[in-house]
Image: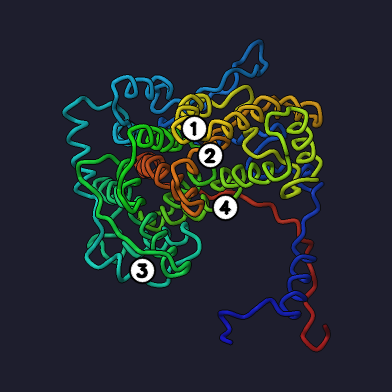
Amino acid sequence: MSGFNMKVTPEITRLTDICYENSRIPVELYGKHDVKRGLRDLNGQGVLTGLTKISNVQAYRMENGKKIPCEGELSYRGYNVEDLTRGFIQDGRLGFEEVTYLLLFGKLPDAEELEGFKQLLATQRSLPRNFVRDVIMKAPSRDMMNTLSRGVLTLYSYDSNPEDISLPNVLRQCLNLISVFPMLSVYGYHAYNHYMRGKSLYIHQPSRELSTAENILRLLRPDKKYTALEATILDLALILHMEHGGGNNSTFTIHVVSSSGTDTYSAIAAALGSLKGPKHGGANIKVVKMFQDMERHVTDFRDEDQVSDYLRKLLHKEAFDKRGLIYGIGHAIYSISDPRAQIFKGFVEKLAREKGRHEEYELYSMVERLAPKIIGEERHIYKGVSANVDFYSGFVYSMLDLPIELYTPMFAIARIVGWSAHRMEELINTDKIIRPAYMNVQDALDYHSLSER
């Protein structure tokens, strides 16, 4: 067996123990030196590390110097997301391309600008000749985020000017990546599904006449068919995941990596690596699996006492993954409500009725109502909790027949818009590399020669 495939041997385990022993830092030292672990203060508030005009999250108001929790608000370029989504939904339009324009350029397009931008994205919606055969179909990965990262880094080789970080060139690269992310993701899944699971293989070409959400459903399904409601709710899901205040892990990664002067492909790949982590991009998968476990252990989904008992078992580390968490409930910033979940919820119910899964929706609604109360009774927390957008997004994706392998790539297809806006903002506003400080807590040691050790 080659060294690359070497298993974890007893020697590796022994060396790991040595590494752990000599690398562990006593928790009390963080408090002693006032180190903000995870760039958060004691109340969980993010440490201010930059300025942005791209989006804002509002979860409290100030009264007499005190923070008072309020209904959550999310704004893109100063526009409340509720107003944005209401605007195009009332007009019977899909909004992904319009909101992409807003985030990238800081203004809402007029009708002519929007049509021109849609056409620009449509012309970018193609991969290099033989890319699908030579890159995506070869060595398919079990993880679509790794497939997506590999595709992005390989596109560097097809770019005639990959290292130029002037704004026009970076914008060109970002628009191309925004356009091809659905293809990289869905084609990567089809390759995995065929070569590693023995299923049928089909590759559909995207349509220049369709929106991003419509093309995702077209590329994914054997018959290329979808309903208007399915396209609407997927479009809405993408918009609600596009951007979130600039303080999340992957967006911070974009700022850090972009500040070094690296190329666009490397910066986006770094952000993908961040989003892949289950603490960031995989929350909706945990919600879906938690509900699957709940359905195996609760005999009557309409019985609030049975559901409450299961939720308490989750908190007591007696159910599901025994982590002590009710996934999809609670957020690092929001307390009273997550506006994305509030916008989403009404459409989720409509889709559940269309799909004949309204009983499942009722279970989700019950958990959304019961969980905050139970968490309040079982835990001493400094703020309230509510359902976040991940609580419903996994359920939506399952109703859209999206395979679970594509849940996090759907997040990436949306969030690359925010990443692109933040990359350009970083390049426009600073020429300094982001360089945080770490305090050394290792005592000085005297050197001993090899024979003396």
Residue drawn at x 69%, y 38% as measured from the top left: 326
Q: Which residue is mark 1?
A: 352
Residue type at tag 2: Phe
Q: Which residue is mark 3?
A: 137
Q: Is residue 258 visible?
A: yes
The answer to whether the residues at label 2 and label 1 have Cβ atoms under 8 Å apart is: yes
Residue 236 image point, x, y percent = 40, 32
Q: Is residue 433 visible?
A: no
Compare marks 3 and 4 and give the one earlier in the sequence. Answer: 3
Q: Which residue is mark 4?
A: 277
The answer to whether the residues at label 2 and label 4 have Cβ atoms under 8 Å apart is: no
Give me the C-alpha separation between circle 3 and circle 1: 35 Å
Residue 300 image point, x, y percent = 71, 34
User: Is 150 displayed left or right of 45 in the figure?
Assistant: left
Position of the N terminus by quadrant: bottom right
The furthest residue to the top: 64
User: Is 28 displayed left or right of 131 in the figure?
Assistant: right
User: Is 189 displayed left or right of 367 in the figure?
Assistant: left
Residue type at tag 4: Gly
Q: Which residue is mark 2?
A: 395
Residue type at tag 3: Met
Q: Nearer the viewer, mark 2 or mark 3?
A: 2
